[in-house]
Every structure is written in C-alpha cells, then in structure tokens.
Amino acid sequence: MTANQNDPIQTLASWIMESSRIVFFGGAGVSTESGIPDFRSEDGLYHQKYDVPPEVILSHTYFKQNPAGFFRFYRERMLYPDAQPGPSHLTLAALEAAGKLSAVVTQNIDGLHQAAGSKKVYELHGSVLRNYCTRCGKAFSLNNLFQNTDDKGIPRCTCGGIIKPDVVLYEESLDQNTITGAVQAIHQADMLIIGGTSLAVYPAAGLIQYYCGHRLVLINKTPTPQDGAADLLIHGPLGSILSQAWQACLTSLAAGTSRAGKDGNCQ
Ligand SMILES: [Zn+2]
C-alpha cells in the first residue's frame, strides 16, 4: 500500500495494522508534551542566567573543569522528576504490548518511555535516573543523587568521589551496546516512525540509515533535513497523531475482528 497524503493518519493506521516490528525513533519533541523543554531551544531567561551555551556546559570538558557550574545547570534545566508520560509515550507502550512495536530508540534521558510501560528502550544518550560515583562506581538513583553535596553543590559519594549522571555528555562516546541494539532493531524493522526530532544531532540521527524498509514515517511539527526521504510525512503534534492512528486501529479491530484476520488492516 502506498502513502495516502490526503489522509495520513488513516495511512499510518493501516501501516501499523500491517506491521509487527515497528521501531520508533524519537527526540526532544516526545518529552516536550510532558512539559520537559528542549534545552537546545533558546529563551531570554537562559541567556540572562548562563554565560555559555548548554552544549558547552553539557560537555565532558566542562564537567571536569567546572562541576559546580555543570550541576547548577543540570539541576535547574535537565531534571523534571514530576514529569509524567505523555500521549506519545503511552501510545508507544500500547503498541509494544499489542505486539506491533519491537523497540523505542530515544535521544531523551528522562526515562518516561519506561514509566509509560515500554520494555525495549534504547537510550542513546543515557538516563538521568542512573548515576555513578566516578571514583568507586557506586550507583545512585535520581532521588539520592543530591542527598550528599559539598559546599559547592556537587554531589558526593560516601567515598568522596563526584557522582556523575549516566548521561552521554558532548565529547563523550555513545554506549556501544546501546548503539548495536538500536542498529539491529532499526535494521530488522518493518516500519520506522521518526518523531519529535529535528534529526540534527549526530551520531544518533545517522542511525536511521540502517532502516531498509519502505515505510519510513516522519512526524514533526517543523520540517527536517530528512523530509524528502519519508514515505509518509506528517507535520503536526506527535502525541495526538500517534494516538489518533492507534485509536483508528483499535476501532476497526473492534468493528471487524473476523475480517481483520483476512485482510489485516484498518480499511
Ligand atoms: Zn564512591
């Protein structure tokens, strides 16, 4: 079936019904629906408070040279412990539970996919929920990361070492096992849905080249450099589009369970 750009949500629903190894590749736009802002989006407040860009503060060099400055920014800008999964997180978890989706690959570090119930999640940039002592390796949850800070506000382990979030900083390599798993999932996918990312951050954005199917779906509020490569392109709010498509699938499944066994789609 080819893309019907006149009714993209119905096309997306049909493709979901015909798929069993969907991979979702997502970025900051997935979590902005949960009230977590994209730190790359600049605002006036940011420029008043910090004299260097977030990409510099979130670098390995800056962490080493100015851990106090790093943790000030990190605490104020990167942590949203009260955020709840949004419509995209919930729909993707439902797709996995229904045997439609094989993996989520995310650039986000907030753990909200797992909070929504997703089991197979490749976190390319790590997670704020995991933290380790840089000296002895002891693990800390987000809740007890700042339990013991020094006079500069730097979290310290009982051994005295600085605790570092398990987040991939600029200048650091992505975890090899995570990349391998994500590449395999994308390579084996029968449909790749890319959502909420401008596809501007490498090497993460380069992973989509491993997809070799013919159902590349791109959902984003604004155009991306990869728009031309999409088999189905939808400019709009990700969570609403995904949940509408999934609802259309559920509705037609409920209406014609006997027929769905024969043609297996939403028509
Ligand atoms: Zn330690």
Image: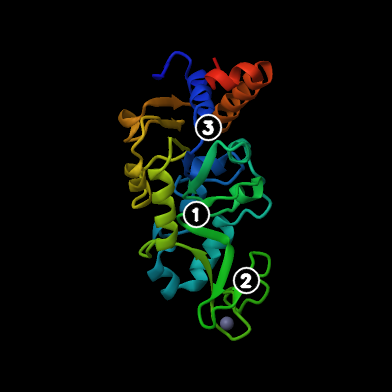
- Can you give x and y, in whole percent of width and height, for residue 196 in the image? 48, 38
- Can you give x and y, in whole percent of width and height, for residue 133 in the image? 55, 77
Q: Residue at x 44, y 54 (%)?
A: 181
User: Image quadrant for the C terminus?
Assistant: top right
CB atoms at circles 2 and 3 under 8 Å apart? no
Query: What residue is disc 1 on?
Result: 123
Q: Is residue 69 above or below residue 181?
A: below
Alpha-carbon span between mark 2 and mark 3: 33 Å
Query: What residue is disc 3 on?
Result: 238
CB atoms at circles 3 and 1 under 8 Å apart? no
Sequence-wise, which precedes: disc 3 or disc 1?
1
Q: Amino acid at mark 2?
A: Phe
- Can you give x and y, in whole percent of width and height, for residue 209 in the image? 32, 43
Q: Nearer the viewer, mark 2 or mark 1?
A: 1
Quarter of image, res 198: top left
Q: Is residue 133 above or below residue 182?
A: below
> Mark 2 packing: few (<14 Cα in 10 Å), some, or many (20+)?
many
Alpha-carbon span between mark 2 and mark 1: 18 Å
* 192 horizontally vs 20: left or right: left
Q: Residue at x 30, y 28 (%)?
A: 228
Q: Tag 1, which secondary structure? A: strand
Q: Amino acid at mark 1?
A: Glu
Q: Amino acid at mark 3?
A: Leu
User: Image quadrant for the N terminus?
Assistant: top left
Alpha-carbon span between mark 3 and mark 1: 19 Å
- Can you give x and y, in whole percent of width and height, for residue 173 in the image? 37, 64
Whether residue 218 is visible: yes
> Mark 3 packing: few (<14 Cα in 10 Å), some, or many (20+)?
many
Q: Tag 2, which secondary structure? A: strand
Q: Nearer the viewer, mark 3 or mark 1?
A: 1
Query: What residue is disc 2 on?
Result: 140
Of residues 242 and 96, the one nearer the viewer is 96
